[in-house]
Image: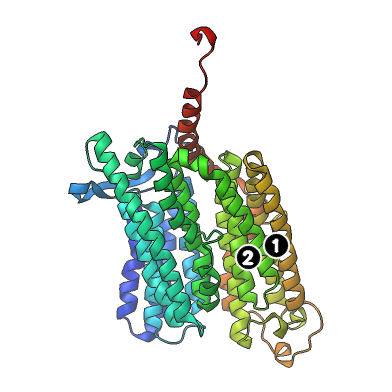
Amino acid sequence: MDHLLTIVTFLPLLGAVACFLSPEGTAKAVALVTALLTFAASIPLWFLYDPAAKGPLSWETFQLVEGPYPWIEDLGITYTVGIDGIALLLVLLTTMLTPVVIVASTSSVHKKVGQYMGFMLMLETGMLGSFVALDTFLFYVFWELMLIPMYFIIGLWGGPNRIYAAMKFFIFTLVGSLLMLVAILSMFVFHHQQLGFWSASVLDLYNVALPYRTELWLFAAFAVAFAIKVPMFPVHTWLPDAHVQAPTGGSVILAGVLLKLGTFGFLRYAMPLFPQATHAMGPLIAGLAAVGIVYGALVAMVQDDVKKLVAYSSVSHMGVVMLGLFAFNVEGVSGSVYQMLNHGLSTGALFLLVGVIYERRHTRLISEYGGLATSVPKFSFVLLLVTFSSIGLPGLNGFIGEALSLLGSFDTHPVATVVGTSGVIFGAVYMLWMVQRVVFGPLTIQANKEMPDLTLREVGYLAPLLVLIVLMGVAPTPFLAKMEPSVERVLVKINAEVDLLAERQQPTPVGGAR
């Protein structure tokens, strides 16, 4: 289908303009219709994408490609979009979560509704564009586009400290983005010097050969930008503030999709562009990921605010994603991509559930709850199911991603994996302890006795996430089959040059025998 990716990417932006111009009373309907149409338009991508395509990482292995259409011709910057199996799954995650968030926001956002819905749809375009862009400058434009609506969503509709949290998010992200821009411009220059023409295409830039020291500096620039977005320890400190202060919809999108752009950025840009530096920095990044897993789990364990607990759990869970990503094998990287999807579903659902009880009680303190299994049994059942998903219970989605990530990582970074696995155990401790204090025990607070259970609307927007949590746990093969050929191609690009360099450094046998 011609221009399908462009339609999916920019339809939310058109809806955003309509929301900004619509009366308050119709903005919610406009936003929901736009989000549902975008999701409907994205569904054919699953069926049109053919994972059986053969060959190395090249133009031929990306599908539904549109372009290159000239944009800034003097620098070889074009409008070029396309997908592989990795981007496909993340695009579908984005288009599925956005209508869920819009429905969930209808009861929590009461002021400047048109602006809120418009910013949410603008954010969707930025996220989708970042996943499908095959031009590095186009990617950067979409990457920066995401910063604007998220800043306003936190700053205008957030909690009491929303300005501080929004500014912290803005500053961290902007600093990383500027470093990435310098690295992108440097790659333009190196490409022109070596190949004689300007190009911003990421597939053209893959062909640029760089000295080892240059690779290290450019990889570091990309890595800082992506590590902030993940976020990795120790550049994670913006995330808990952003999550706690953001409205429920903002927290869901932040955890469900925005954080994945950091790990996606590593896999699409930093790692295949700079393979020597990737392998050299692999042990350091794996070590930081392991520290982040344990640190996030331990800090989550002592939280008295349930939303902050879930926020720190994201730091821990994304550490598992990073461990798998830098395993440099199919099991680890496939598990990492699978865990990106899992985290988007389970943590997104947790933030939605926190929003449900906050709307009823206007408190997120764990001590204010207890015994909810008696008064709100449907809510309690859903919370327990999502908790089991988050801690990786076999039969649910979290188990597959964690198992593959850690198994793959153990072959490459055994010490970091052992440390990280201990953090996964701590994760089960703090999540189950939270459930015990919120759901079980005596029902002593009168307000909890009178709390209404999940409404039909709330069940409706939670249902897609719950179905996928179970489906991806019992039937992972269709999802893995879509992504694994793309993972293998990226790994060939990352590992091939390093293997070739190692062969060149081997001593010549005595007598010059070959």
- Count the labels in the image: 2
Q: Which mark is residue 313?
A: 2
Q: Residue furthest left?
A: 74
Q: Position of residue 195 (x, y in %)?
A: 26, 34
**Secondary element at tag 2:** helix
- Observer able to see residue 7: no
Height in image: 303 above or below 369?
above
Front position in the image: 370 or 285: 285
Height in image: 62 above or below 400?
above
Q: Position of residue 126 (x, y in %)?
A: 38, 62
The answer to whether the residue labelled 2 contacts the one labelled 1, judged by CB atoms less than 8 Å apart, is yes
The amino acid marked with disc number 1 is Gly
Residue labelled with disc 1:
427
- Observer able to see residue 220: yes
The residue located at (47%, 52%) in the rendering is 264
Height in image: 466 above or below 341?
below
Residue neighbourhood size for the residue with mark 2, other residues' Cα within 10 Å, grouped as few (<14), some (14–19), many (≥20): many
Lower sequence index among marks 2 and 1: 2
Q: Residue furthest top?
A: 511
The residue located at (58%, 53%) in the rendering is 288
The residue located at (34%, 77%) in the rendering is 19
Q: Position of residue 268 (x, y in %)?
A: 43, 47
Give the image quarter of residue 314. bottom right
Q: Position of residue 506 (x, y in %)?
A: 52, 22
Front position in the image: 450 or 225: 225
